[in-house]
């Protein structure tokens, strides 16, 4: 009984050390290679903000390899990407209520699914899966839309999320040879 108790205490101490020392170290270490980025935009007096970590291509094949097709991606590195809107907005033809959401994607060769989720977990993937499984709770999805993929002429080294406004405001994702634009709009009163 004493041996079992000592083993249990040792495991608890090691687990606590990993959680309180190891995890913060790993998180800080990975952010050196995938820096945190915040993008803001004022859209008709509505502030929009995206917080994400920006990984680099580093001569790797990104979509279909590092980021598999047909699987949920945390959309960047480290913690899940977050999207904040101060007011209700339209995402394509669907309403997204004011708030902060984790932003997930399902990349495919021709189309991406963009997912806004009301939960923001601490880390974007599970450690036990080696980073292959996300921490997204599917039941907390608020909105999903699909958008077509555009091919870039030249590869983009760093993953970027930006707001682009021409005749329409877009939330844009670009990395490697891929770009997707998600149309955003104000809700009409009436």
Image (tube, rainbow, N blue to C red):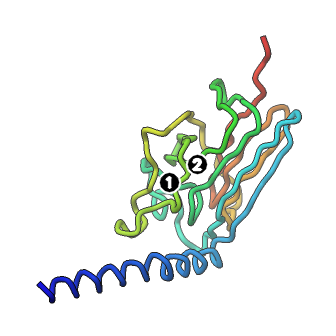
- Reply above or below: 112 against 68: above
11 to the left or right of 174: left
Residue 122, given in percent of the width and then of the height, sits at 53, 60
Q: Residue furthest front?
A: 2
Residue 128, given in percent of the width and then of the height, sits at 35, 68
**Contact? badges 2 and 1 (CB < 8 Å):** no
Q: Earlier in the sequence, mark 2 or mark 1?
A: 1
Q: In which quarter of the view is residue 114 placed?
A: top right
Residue under the point 65% across and 26% down? 95
Q: Nearer the viewer, residue 174 or 79?
A: 79
In the rendered image, which quarter contains the C terminus? top right
Residue 9, given in percent of the width and then of the height, sits at 28, 83
- Reply above or below: 116 against 190: below
Please name which of the two marks, 2 or 1, marks the residue nearer to the observer: 2
Instruction: Please say whether residue 111 is visible from this viewpoint.
Output: no
What whole-number distance in Å separates the C-alpha atoms at marks 2 and 1? 11 Å
In the rendered image, which quarter contains the N terminus? bottom left
Residue under the point 49% across and 78% down? 20
Q: Residues within 10 Å of mark 1 (few under 14, many from 20)?
A: many
Q: Nearer the viewer, residue 149 or 39?
A: 39
Residue under the point 57% across and 55% down? 75
Q: Nearer the viewer, residue 153 or 37?
A: 37
The local secondary structure at tag 1 comes to: loop
Q: In which quarter of the view is residue 170 placed?
A: top right
- Reply above or below: 93 against 11: above
Instruction: Please say whether residue 31 is visible from this viewpoint.
Output: yes
**Dot 2 corresponds to which residue?**
102
**Dot 1 corresponds to which residue?**
73
């Amino acid at each position: 009984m004493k041996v079992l108790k000592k083993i249990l205490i040792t495991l608890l101490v090691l687990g606590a050390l990993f959680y309180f020392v190891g995890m913060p170290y790993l998180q800080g270490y990975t952010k050196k290679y995938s820096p945190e980025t915040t993008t803001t935009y004022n859209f008709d007096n509505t502030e929009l903000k995206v917080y994400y970590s920006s990984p680099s291509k580093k001569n790797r094949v990104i979509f279909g390899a590092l980021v598999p097709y047909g699987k949920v991606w945390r959309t960047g590195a480290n913690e899940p990407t977050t999207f904040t809107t101060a007011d209700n907005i339209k995402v394509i033809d669907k309403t997204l209520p004011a708030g902060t959401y984790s932003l997930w994607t399902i990349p495919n060769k021709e189309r991406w699914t963009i997912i806004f989720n009301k939960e923001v977990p601490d880390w974007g993937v599970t450690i036990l899966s080696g980073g292959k499984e996300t921490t997204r709770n599917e039941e907390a999805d608020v909105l999903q839309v699909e958008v077509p993929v555009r091919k870039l002429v030249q590869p983009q080294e760093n993953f970027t999320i930006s707001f682009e406004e021409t005749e329409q405001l877009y939330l844009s994702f670009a990395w490697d040879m891929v770009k997707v634009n998600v149309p955003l709009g104000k809700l009409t009163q009436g």
